[in-house]
Amino acid sequence: YVTVYTDGSCIKQDVVPARAGAGLCWGIGCDRNVSLRVPGTQTSNRAELYAVLEAVLRADPYRALRIYTDSQNTIRICCHWAPTYAMTGW
């Protein structure tokens, strides 16, 4: 499997001009490591989720992916609530 560490952050959340970013770390010195500006609404929760989304989109689809995050909200959404969200068209 491939391992990626993700993180997201937002400064001045819920005020203008809030700024949110996401980061992916595939390994020390890896050229795939990246920091990204989060599109849309600028919050820390969106930044954490965006980091995971980008990791999935950028990963090799033929290899298992292990994602590390420090966001309990992101873990709950992806591992527990996603089936319910999918049934409601999320």
Image: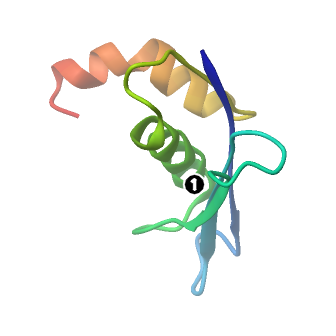
Identify the residue shown where x is 17% and y is 25%: 88
Relative to 9, residue 19 above or below: below
- The structure's colour scheme is rainbow
Residue linked to disc 1: 47
Q: Residues within 10 Å of mark 1 (few under 14, many from 20)?
A: many
Give the left or right position of residue 29, taking residue 24 as reference.
Answer: right
Identify the residue shown where x is 43% and y is 68%: 39
Image quadrant assignment for residue 62: top left
Image position, residue 12 (x, y; %): 70, 75
Query: What residue occupies the far right of the structure in this picture?
Result: 28
The kind of secondary structure element at disc 1 is helix
Q: Amino acid at mark 1?
A: Ala
Image position, residue 65 (x, y; %): 54, 21
Nearest the eye: 66 or 43: 66
Relative to 50, residue 19 above or below: below
Nearest the eye: 38 or 30: 30
Identify the residue shown where x is 60% and y is 46%: 48
Relative to 43, residue 83 above or below: above
Relative to 41, residue 18 above or below: below
Which image quadrant: the N terminus? top right
